Amino acid sequence: MEHDAGTRRQGLLAAAALLSVTAAWGSTFFLIKDLVEVVPPLDFLAVRFAIAAVALFLLRPRAVLALSGDALKRGVVLGLVYGAAQILQTVGLAHTAASVSGFVTGMYVVFTPILAALVLRQRIGAPVWIAVVVATVGLGFLSLDGLSIGYGEGITLLSAVLYAAHIVMLGAWTSAREAYALAVVQMAVISVMCLIMTAPGGVTLPQTGGQWLSMVYMALVAGAFAMLAQTWAQAHLPATRAAIIMSMEPVFAAAFAIGFTAESLTLRTLLGGGMVLAAMLIAEAVPRRHVEAEVPHLSQ
């Protein structure tokens, strides 16, 4: 009983950590919108993740240097997958509306249980599928005014598949003990990927103190903290449950936009946000008598 109670508490703590991650991500939307008008998106990603990786490495260098060769390889693969998703999402955003991009990217909540079932042989129960459907409809209310399928949407959909793959792989390949080091490795890989792509034209840096303040916030809070918290949390949560919790990101984004910009609260925002919140609560209410069995780990 004590073990079950401890596992349940750990699961709730992991869910809370992921929820804080989505809040951090949601808080960056209106900041990113202003910053990328000065700093090109790939330059922004390269500098953001470089600052995050260096900061975490300097805090605990021994944790990173003690990482085994196999764990290092897993971290590099995770970073490549996540970095590719970020880059594809950025490219897709140049060819589609931001609202459509947000909805299509959020489709990782659908792809995650599909990949978990196919790759990890996880059995996805009916309540979880119900939560996935409710979250998807809620994302539609939050994001869409119309949807057409073209090049930009196709590229963004591919990024959603990669985000789902990253969520599934993170849940299967990480342990709480290695979470810190793997977070550093992933962010370093993402930064190097973006630097390689942007190097021919040079790297554009923020121009003012305010822009640097925004960059540092996104690097340390929405970058370093978020990646560390997500990596640790997914060592304790099934991938599908994690994806449903993370679908709260646009809800937080809308809340911050309403609170700090001129955007107003609409019925659609309330309805969409309420449905995503309901989906998370449905996923959290699913009985989990064998929690550890729900988080299969690939051989390491």
Image: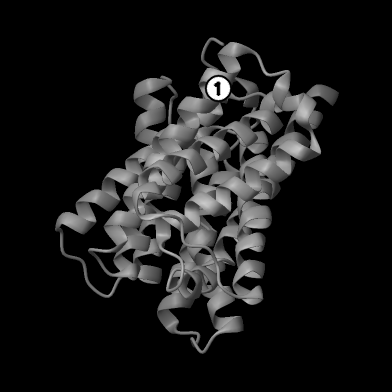
Coordinates of residue 20 in the picture (x, y in percent): 67, 55
Residue reaching furthest to the top: 299
Say if 209 sits above or below 227 in the image.
below
Q: Please name whichever residue, 266 or 250, is drawn nearer the observer in this view of the structure.
A: 250
Residue 66 lies in quadrant:
top right
Q: Quadrant of the N terminus?
A: top right
Q: Quadrant of the C terminus?
A: top right
Task: Determine crowd level at label 1: few under 14, some 14-19, many 20+ residues with C-alpha closer than 10 A.
Answer: many
Residue 61 lies in quadrant:
top right
- Horizontally, residue 206 falls left or right of residue 51, namely left
Coordinates of residue 169 in the picture (x, y in percent): 48, 28
Say if 264 sits above or below 97 in the image.
below
Q: Residue at x 64, y 35 (%)?
A: 184
Q: Please name whichever residue, 205 or 157, is drawn nearer the observer in this view of the structure.
A: 205
- Horizontally, residue 98 falls left or right of residue 30, namely left
Q: Residue at x 43, y 39 (%)?
A: 193
Residue 18 visible, this angle = no
The amino acid marked with disc number 1 is Trp
Q: Please name whichever residue, 105 or 48, is drawn nearer the observer in this view of the structure.
A: 48
Q: What element does badge 1 sit on?
A: helix
What residue does disc 1 label?
Answer: 173
- Horizontally, residue 84 falls left or right of residue 188, namely left
Coordinates of residue 148 in the picture (x, y in percent): 16, 64
Q: Residue at x 43, y 20 (%)?
A: 120
Residue 148 visible, this angle = yes
Residue 255 lies in quadrant:
bottom right
